[in-house]
């Protein structure tokens, strides 16, 4: 073919210098997937020498961070710890890592959000208590809690066990209540009607979210009274179970 120099079989073109003492080989790979073309520009130029200072060979690494000559770098699972994170402040036990775009690294340690239970206090009584008083008297179950913040909520759970109204030939009633300090926060009124001919035995549960709005100690207690002056009881069968009071402080 006119204008074409073909070199077959050898896979390289060898060009000697002026005194034939050295040469340059232009080498073709042993196999190519398609025909290739090297186009020489229409201008004089010199092929630059290889600069070994600018040739980068990616090293191989093993261990927690692995890499290979192809440049792929992989961080092993469960390796990045607190010391390797760029966080704007120091960690505090119980704090959570949160996003904060205005801080260094975009991360900051912060206290958990609201709804966290901060403390639990409880009390129980298994002995019978009775009264004929028409004014509230103590069941014998009370618990005190000191909120850690004035905006905390107190979840008050109470269980009056085996409230008892004896059988009688006249109407009788019993009132039970839960108090925070001297303030009633839960109350229930049970009636016994003439002619039923049977005693009344029942349990009563209360649940209330209370806002004491203080960091001073608050005492919660369970009370009851006879509305009609007849005898009424709590914990009728003694230690068959307990009347209980549970207080949970919940962060705002």
Image: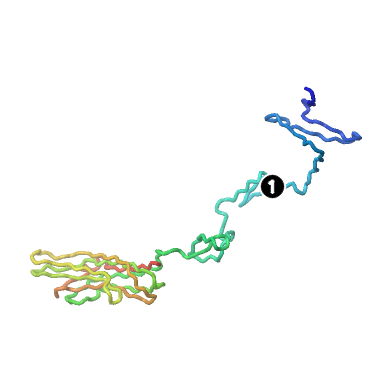
| Quarter of the rendering containing residue 208 | bottom left
* Residue visible at 55% across and 53% down in the picture: 78
Q: Residues within 10 Å of mark 1 (few under 14, many from 20)?
A: few
Q: Residue furthest right?
A: 19
Q: Is residue 21 left or right of residue 193?
A: right
Residue at image position (39%, 75%) is: 215
Q: Residue furthest top?
A: 1
Q: Nearer the viewer, residue 65 or 6?
A: 6
Residue farthest front in this picture:
42
Please state if 218 lies on the left or on the right of 94 as rendered. Answer: left
- The quadrant of the image that shows the N terminus is top right
Give x and y (percent) for residue 249. Answer: 37, 68
Give the color scheme: rainbow, by chain, secondary structure or one colour: rainbow
In the displayed structure image, the side of residue 69 where residue 183 appears, left or right: left
Helix, strand or loop at label 1? It is loop
Question: In this orientation, which residue lies closer to the viewer: 65 or 96?
Answer: 96
Q: Position of residue 170 (x, y in %)?
A: 9, 70
How many numbered marks appear?
1
Residue at 22% across / 76% down in the picture?
A: 136
> Is 51 located above or below residue 132 in the figure?
above
From the viewer's side, name the closer residue of 175 and 56.
56
> Which residue is painted at 51% across and 66% down in the image?
92
Residue 148 placement (x, y as % from top left):
41, 72
Give coordinates of residue 168: x percent, y percent: 10, 69
In the picture, which quadrant includes the C terminus?
A: bottom left
* Residue on which disc 1 sits: 58
């Amino acid at each position: 073919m006119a204008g074409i120099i073909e070199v077959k079989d050898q896979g390289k073109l060898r060009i000697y210098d002026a005194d034939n003492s050295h040469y340059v080989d232009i080498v073709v790979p042993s196999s190519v997937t398609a025909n290739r073309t090297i186009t020489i520009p229409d201008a004089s130029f010199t092929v630059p020498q290889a600069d070994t200072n600018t040739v980068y060979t990616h090293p191989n690494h093993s261990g927690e961070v692995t890499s290979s000559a192809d440049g792929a770098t992989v961080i092993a699972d469960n390796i990045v710890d607190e010391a390797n994170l760029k966080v704007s402040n120091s960690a505090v036990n119980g704090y959570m890592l949160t996003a904060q775009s205005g801080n260094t690294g975009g991360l900051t340690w912060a206290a958990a959000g609201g709804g966290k239970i901060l403390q639990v206090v409880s009390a129980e009584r298994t002995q019978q208590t009775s009264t004929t008083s028409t004014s509230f008297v103590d069941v014998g179950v009370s618990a005190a809690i000191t909120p850690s913040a004035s905006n905390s909520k107190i979840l008050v759970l109470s269980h009056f066990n085996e409230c008892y109204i004896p059988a009688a030939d006249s109407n009788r009633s019993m009132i039970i209540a839960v108090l925070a300090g001297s303030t009633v926060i839960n109350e229930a009124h049970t009636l016994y009607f003439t002619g039923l001919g049977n005693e009344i035995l029942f349990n009563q549960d209360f649940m209330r979210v209370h806002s004491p709005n203080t960091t001073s100690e608050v005492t919660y207690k369970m009370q009851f009274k006879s509305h009609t002056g007849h005898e009424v009881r709590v914990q009728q069968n003694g230690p068959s179970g307990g009347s209980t009071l549970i207080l949970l402080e919940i962060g705002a």
